[in-house]
């Protein structure tokens, strides 16, 4: 389990990481296990919208000092299609 992601969701903190050799900064909304048994993160990325990331493909995950106030209005935990939710807004 990635406690950094769970804590960031709980505290409404943005997170940054490397994904496919690119720097990404997102608002994490839901973290859990997908139907294939892999840890996944549903997050909102400004300019790109909703993204689902496989956690084992993320590098250098860290929470940022800046947070966000509320979940995005279009958010629903069902969007993530996870078989088990570990942490969610």
Image: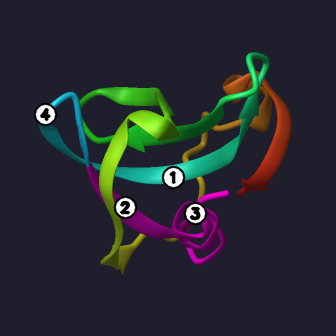
Residue carrying label 4: 21
Residue 56: image tag: none
First of labels 4, 3 by sequence position: 4
Q: Which residues are magenta?
A: 1-17
| Residue at horizontal 44 percent and vertical 28 percent from the top | 51
Q: Which residue is under mark 3?
A: 70
Q: x, y percentage for residue 40?
A: 60, 35
* Among the 4 quarters of the image, the one containing residue 77: top right
- Circles 2 and 1: CB atoms closer than 8 Å: yes
What residue sits 64% from the left and 64% below the top?
6
Q: Marks 3 and 2, Cα distance to the nearest angstrom? A: 15 Å
* Residue 65 included in the magenta stretch of the image: no
Which secondary structure, mark 1? strand
Element assignment for label 4: loop
The residue to which callout 2 is attached is 15
Q: Position of residue 72 (x, y in %)?
A: 55, 47
Give the answer, above or below, for where 82 lies relative to 70: above
**Image side of residue 85 versus residue 47, left or right:** right
In the rendered image, residue 13 lying in the magenta stretch gets the answer: yes
Residue where numbered disc 1 is placed: 28
In the depicted view, which residue is nearer to us: 57 or 15? 57
Residue 11, how many percent across, how many down?
59, 77
Task: Specify few, some or many for label 2: CA neighbours under 10 Å numbering under 14, 14-19, or 20 or more.
Answer: many
Whichever of labels 2 and 1 marks the residue nearer the N terminus, that label is: 2
Q: Earlier in the sequence, mark 2 or mark 4?
A: 2
55 left or right of 84 in image: left
Callout 3 secondary element:
loop
Tell me: residue 46, above or below residue 47: below
């Amino acid at each position: 389990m990635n406690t950094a992601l769970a804590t960031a969701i709980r505290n409404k903190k943005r997170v940054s990481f490397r994904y496919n050799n690119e720097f990404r900064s997102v608002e994490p909304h839901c973290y859990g296990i997908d139907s294939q048994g892999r840890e996944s993160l549903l997050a909102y990325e400004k300019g790109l919208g909703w993204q689902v990331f496989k956690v084992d493909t993320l590098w250098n995950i860290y929470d940022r000092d800046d947070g966000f106030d509320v979940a995005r209005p279009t958010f629903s935990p069902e969007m993530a299609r996870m078989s088990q939710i570990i942490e969610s807004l």
